[in-house]
Amino acid sequence: MRRGEVWTASRFGHDRKVVIVGHDAITRQRKAVLVVPISEVMPPGLVEPTVSDSEGTVLGVAQVPRVGEISKEGLKAHAGMLASTSVEKINMALRSTLDL
């Protein structure tokens, strides 16, 4: 599991896509991973950018203010990798959201 990877996560009986945003070394050491959910219906905003995978397919809107931790057991299937431009959009949104 690496930063920028997209996974299908199962929580409370629902599946949704999430992107890993935690540091790779920390992710390896923990039983949980820091993620941002991706919405297919929410409109983009200042800290909620539209993101695409490495093939250029739009995945949806990264809900950066909803950043949180999920158990690795809740990640069901690897769904791809974000494009480098989308990773940078999430980086900027995280810095804004967390005032870093």
Image: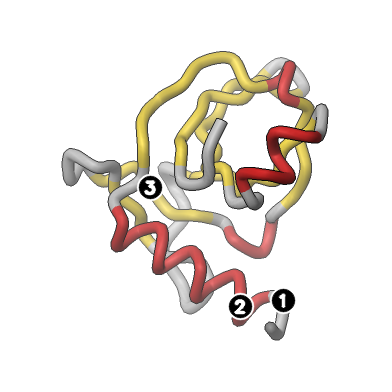
Q: Residue at x 69, y 56 (%)?
A: 66
Q: Residue 30's mark?
A: none
**Quadrant location of the N terminus?**
top right
The residue identified by callout 2 is 95
Q: Residue at x 60, y 70 (%)?
A: 94
- The correct choice, above or below, for 52 with respect to 100 in the image is above
> Mark 3 or 1 closer to N-term?
3
Front one among 57 and 4: 4
Q: Residue at x 66, y 76 (%)?
A: 97
> What residue type is disc 1 on?
Leu
Front one among 19 and 45: 19
Q: Residue at x 73, y 16 (%)?
A: 73
Q: Secondary structure at mark 3?
A: strand
The residue identified by callout 1 is 98
Q: Position of residue 56 (x, y in %)?
A: 17, 45
Q: Position of residue 2 (x, y in %)?
A: 53, 38
Q: Is residue 82 left or right of residue 47?
A: left
The reply to whether dot 1 and dot 2 touch (C-beta < 8 Å) is: yes
**Quadrant location of the C terminus?**
bottom right
Q: Is residue 5 left or right of residue 22?
A: left
Please rate how many residues cluster around mark 2, counting C-alpha atoms within 10 Å: few if below 14, some from 14 to 19, many from 20. Answer: few
> What residue type is disc 3 on?
Gly
The residue identified by callout 3 is 60
Please rate how many residues cluster around mark 3, counting C-alpha atoms within 10 Å: few if below 14, some from 14 to 19, many from 20. Answer: many
> Mark 2 or 3 closer to N-term?
3
Q: Secondary structure at mark 2?
A: helix
